[in-house]
Image: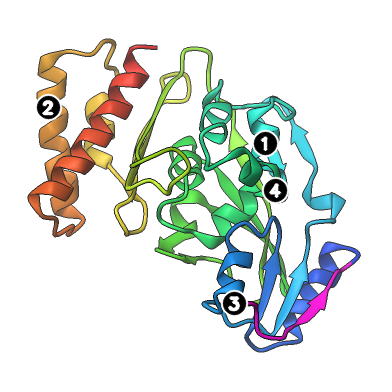
Amino acid sequence: MKPAPFDYVRPRDLGEAVAALSEFEWGARVLAGGQSLVPMLNLRLSPVLRLVDISGLEELRGVEEDAEGVTFGACVRHGEFEDGKVPDPARGMMHHVAGRIAYRAVRNRGTIGGSLSLADPSADWITVVMALGASFVIRGAAGERRVAGSDMFLGPYSTALGEHDILAAIRVPKLGRSARWGYYKVIHKAGEYPMTTASVVLDPDRGRSSVVLGAVNRGPLEMARMAAGMQGAGTWSAQLEGNLREAIRLDLEAAGRDQDSCEMKLCETTLLRAAQSALVQ
């Protein structure tokens, strides 16, 4: 199949892009890397009246680094993280995750901002940026605003972005020297969307301990009890594993996650392997 007819706009700057979106009450969509949107258009699963192509906007491809963190333009591509062409404030975590997203052809075109804006529950970046304590710079008709990671993702394919908003940048704080991290995902074969993902960040220098569960066809879930159980943990042990299993059960129960035994085991295994990889670095 091919897409239904639509209007195509290639703005000269971000302000013009927001204006082009605002001309339509609904049905105007942003095109960045196009790795998710274009297939949906071809299958006519995503009704679009206008595409606003922001892929050529240099202001969305910039990277700014300071002592506290790095701000990535939303159109920085996965492959640039994988190839080390941009700094990694997460001490290797972003490089590691980017290199395992789908296939190289996808990583050459797909953008971090496009992935986060779509909020596919199986996408790799969501749990990572949440665990790192990232924040988001959003541009809309009313101007610019910043949104914390915990407030950005409202559910599967649902974010704090309004109908006429564009994600402009992602601000990622730098991890301390003693920080450790873990990332794990369960997939049937390389290149497929994962069934589950989990990110763990332990940063005693910043007093941060964070665990985020992703995929499972639901929005990302911050595992507060598990994160508290990992704070100050030095090495992996049978006792720690037992404590974390109980914390996982309580976190899922508190979130109202009604899961069958198979799904529960899948989530538990993914979280424990991410936690273990953080402690054995």
Mark 3 residue element:
loop
For mark 2, what is the residue? 243
- The correct choice, above or below, for 18 with respect to 193 in the image is below
Is 8 inside the magenta-drawn segment?
yes
Which tag, 3 or 1, sits closer to the chain's start? Answer: 3
Magenta residues span: 1-11
Whether tag 3 and tag 4 are in contact, CB under 8 A, the answer is no
Q: Position of residue 202 (x, y in %)?
A: 39, 24
Within 10 angstroms of label 3, few (less than 14), some, or many (20 or more) residues? few
Residue 1's tag is 3
Of labels 3 and 4, the one closer to you:
3
Is disc 4 surrounded by few (<14), some (14 to 19) or many (20+) residues within 10 Å? some
Q: Label 3 near label 2: C-beta < 8 Å? A: no
Q: CA distance from mark 3 to mark 4?
A: 22 Å
Q: Which residue is mark 4?
A: 109
Mark sitting earlier along the chain (3/4): 3
Q: Nearer the viewer, mark 4 or mark 2?
A: 4
Tag 1 residue: 79
Name which of mark 2 and mark 3 comes first in the sequence.
3
Sequence-first disc among 2 and 1: 1
| Amino acid at pointer 2 | Asn
Q: Dot 1: what SS?
A: helix
